[in-house]
Image (cartoon, rainbow, N blue to C red):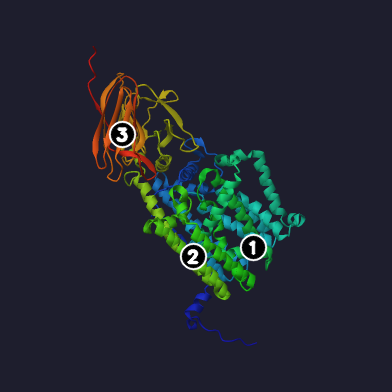
Amino acid sequence: MTTAPTASLTDLSLGDRLAAVPAWLWLGGMVAISSVLRVSMSFAHVAPRVFPDEYIYASLGRSLADGSLTIRGEPAGFPALLEPLLAAPLWLVAGDDVGLGYHLTQGMHALAVSMVAIPVFLLARRIGLSAWLGLGCAAVSLVLPALAFAPFVMADPVALPLALGAVAAGTMALDRPARRSQVAFVALAGLATLARVQYVVLPLAYLAASLVVTRGSVRRTMREQRVVLVLVAFGVVGLVATGPARVLGYYDGILNLDADPIGIGRWLASDLMLLAYAAGWVLVPAALVGLVLGVSRPRSRAEQSFAALSAASAALLLLEAAVYAANGSERFQERYLIALLPLCPLLCCLGVRRLDGRGARIAVAGLAAGLLLVAAVVPLAGYTALTGKLDSPTLWAAYELEQRFGTGNGSAALALIATVLAVVAAATTLAPRVAGTVTIGVAIAALGAASVAAAGYDRTQSERTMLTFGDDDASWIDHAGVGPVSVLQTPYSSRLQISSQLFWNRSLTEILRMEPSSEVDVYGSRKVSLTSDGRVLADGRPVRTPLLVEEYASWATLEDARLARRTINAALWVPEGDGPRLALLLAGRYFDGLLAAESTVTIWPGVEGRRTAVIELPLALPRDAPGTVIDIVAPGLRRSVALAPGARTMLRLPVDTTRPWTASIRTRSPFWVGGRLLAAEAGTPRLVEAKAPKEQ
């Protein structure tokens, strides 16, 4: 038998040479390049900014590295322990260098999140896609804006590849039931749940998909999936025996969520629309067709297994996100839905394979027209406002566009981009042979651009967070070397700022909470009271530890204490004598010098039992603010001060008291800046002591 002569490698064209490279080598290169790029991008993410989440995960990792499982001395009760377990060796290597531990954790996340390409490629091959389309789908998964969460100290980067791995193993086990693949599914689903509790629904989605594959036959499902059923049953028994609330720990509040049908329905609709944007928009029409036909009229058992598992997982994860949003979060939970996004290009390819049928072409064109209508009618500006974009890198990207061109022009540009993508999706029905390649290519370009914009937004916000420390040394409290420090949480304080200080400074060991202020997190604080001379008491005893006084929206002056250092929103006081005492507290003065529309200033008498002084408070009104009158009411004092735009004045309030003295400061014409209702610009308050009047 003769064979045709084989051309040498040098005789091949560039395209043939590239085609000769094994797919696994291309895949490995993509993962490696993505990891390197995301590590480099993490250097721009200079500070954590999602709290208390990032503080909790970092604290657990450091605690595990020290051989315990506590946060500020309190038992953690935190079920999502996989990320802290993986990060613990990195924190151990870093030791007391919080910055090094932070960057090492970011590096681990960059590698973990890049590995999502592997299960995506395996799924593509399982459902019969070519190696090149499989690599294209993997590439889409690596440019998703949602991967901007990689440098955050949270579970999402670790949980994502595990959840996709569970879908890949589950598809294999549904397609060809075998003990090995079923054990692999349960293991990966369990690890994904250990990383992020929301993925506890994956086994339920798997069992629902198995009923679809077996055409509703419970007996056949029990026979084919007995390994999964047994392992899941053991897990359920363990959960019931231990108690759901005890197992959930930190997340036990989900047992008390309300089921508001109207609110849930509203958020389901919003989440579906925003999920379409997050998935690339152009992929969605064919993906929906692929999902429906994959479940109802599959061309292979593997196709039906994947489509059914994807549909069940999407339904349950969307329901989780909608219930949570309807109970007060009021924002798009892209973090909750991140595992659905890499499935979209795969489902799109399934839909493209059906474009040989007239019905599928009509359906794709009709869905594209529907997306075009949605883009025109529902602007994204309503979702990017204030905290609505907190958990959505896709909305970060939209906000960046609005900031660059203005809200109105930015919204119009977004609608135009979505329109073009919808038109491309419809146009692919005219060329079914290249539809998959074109759609995947356009999706990579669109999602890549959105990812760049999301990274830009994240870099800006991260840098702003770091600026709140006042200099480049975020661990300045540790470096002060004054030993264990307590945080004094002042009225109207920022929980985010306190969590940020706790993240960077391990010497902060407890929170002492003044009223009115809310809990920073669930890991404990002690309420404090003040004596008549301003001494700080916790559990009825004077506090004698150094105090970090939180000054996001307050300004304090202490006595019997030395000011070690003050930054723009916190002051470190070291006690002297019998412990620190408050002398002055201006509650309502923000860190940037703006005074709230309603604020108070309180003065405490000195240790001799009396204080005679004058409070000096510089006030000014911005030129673009309306003129106003500021009213001051205090014991034995009523005063009104008129302020014109651009005007400055020194407010002087005399104090002669033997007990705590409080003045109320209110404006008649407040103005808005940064979501805050304000009265004026306020300088640094000063307490000028005077001689006490002589006894008569």
Amino acid type, callout 3: Ile
Identify the mark at residue 564; answer none if there is no mark. none
Q: Which mark is residue 292?
A: 1
Left or right of 427? Residue 555 is left
Q: Which dot, 2 or 3, sits closer to the camera? A: 3
According to the picture, the residue beneath numbered tag 3 turns out to be 630
What residue is rendered at 42% in x and 45% in y? 95
Q: CA separation, marks 3 and 1?
A: 64 Å
Looking at the rendered image, the quarter that the N terminus falls into is bottom right
Residue situated in front as seen by the camera: 500 or 416: 416
> Which label sits on residue 419?
2
Instruction: Look at the numbered disc 3 and give the secondary structure of its residue.
Output: strand
Which element carries disc 1, helix, strand or loop? helix
- The Cα–Cα distance between marks 2 and 1, rounded to whole angstroms, is 24 Å
Question: Which of marks 1 and 2 precedes in the sequence?
Answer: 1
Q: Position of residue 310 (x, y in %)?
A: 62, 58
Residue 433 lies, in percent from the top left, at: 57, 75
Name the mark nearer the viewer: 3 or 1: 3
Instruction: Check the picture and name the quadrant holding the C terminus.
Output: top left
